[in-house]
Amino acid sequence: MPKLTLPISPWEGFSPTHTELHHDTLTIHLTPTGPGRCRCGQVVRQIHDITPRTIQEREAFGYQTLLSVPLRRLRCPDCGVVTERLSWLEPHARQTNRLIQYVERLLKLMPIKHVNEMTGLHWHTLKRLDRRRLAREV
Ligand SMILES: [Zn+2]
């Protein structure tokens, strides 16, 4: 069967290996496609350790979508041990930048209660994102 390829790379530096479906939640497992990049911009091949992290992604095909991402801590010759820098995930974030941007648009249009129903994101998470959005816009 021909392999499906997309004209976009939704998770730069990573590619999906397999998916799991439990009830209405789709979990996409990702694996790195090359060495990581430090926050200073350097490509770093030395890996300190790897920690799997679960990240919420935007809905895909009507399913709540989670990513299972093996995040690397790198041993940068200049910065020491640092978590790799990704274009689609802020340090310590539990949601992709794509999901956060979508939620911020929804928060402008409707009450938090409705955004909670639409996205399944926790009330406290939405409050925090909304405060951050408002602070940025002031
Ligand atoms: Zn560095």
Image (cartoon, rainbow, N blue to C red):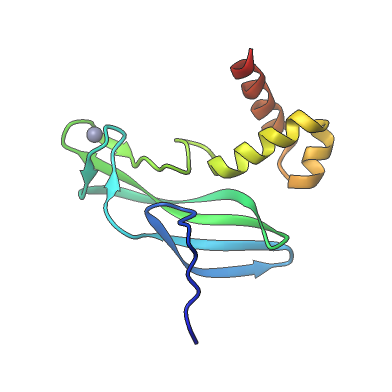
Residue nearest the observer in this picture, 6 or 98: 6
Residue nearest the observer in this picture, 52 or 116: 116
Specify the quarter for ligand 1: top left
Residue nearest the observer in this picture, 7 or 79: 7
Residue at the image position 59 percent from the left and 62 percent from the top: 27
Residue at the image position 63 percent from the left and 17 percent from the top: 137
Residue furthest out toward the left: 77
Q: Is residue 35 left or right of residue 87?
A: left
Residue 58: give x, y in percent of width and height.
63, 50
Residue nearest the observer in this picture, 72 or 14: 14
Residue 31: give x, y in percent of width and height.
40, 61
Q: Which part of the image, by quadrant, shows the C terminus?
A: top right
Q: Is residue 123 above or below residue 96?
A: above
Residue 11: give x, y in percent of width and height.
46, 53
Q: Is residue 77 left or right of residue 121?
A: left
Residue furthest out toward the front: 7
- Asked where in the image residue 24 lies, by quadrant, the reply is bottom right
Residue at the image position 69 percent from the left and 26 percent from the top: 130
Q: Is residue 95 above or below residue 138?
A: below
Residue 29: give x, y in percent of width and height.
50, 63
Please tell me how many numbered marks the rendered image carries: 0
Residue at the image position 54 percent from the left and 62 percent from the top: 28
Q: Is residue 4 above or below residue 134?
A: below
Residue furthest out toward the bottom: 1
- Asked where in the image residue 44 lies, by quadrant, the reply is top left
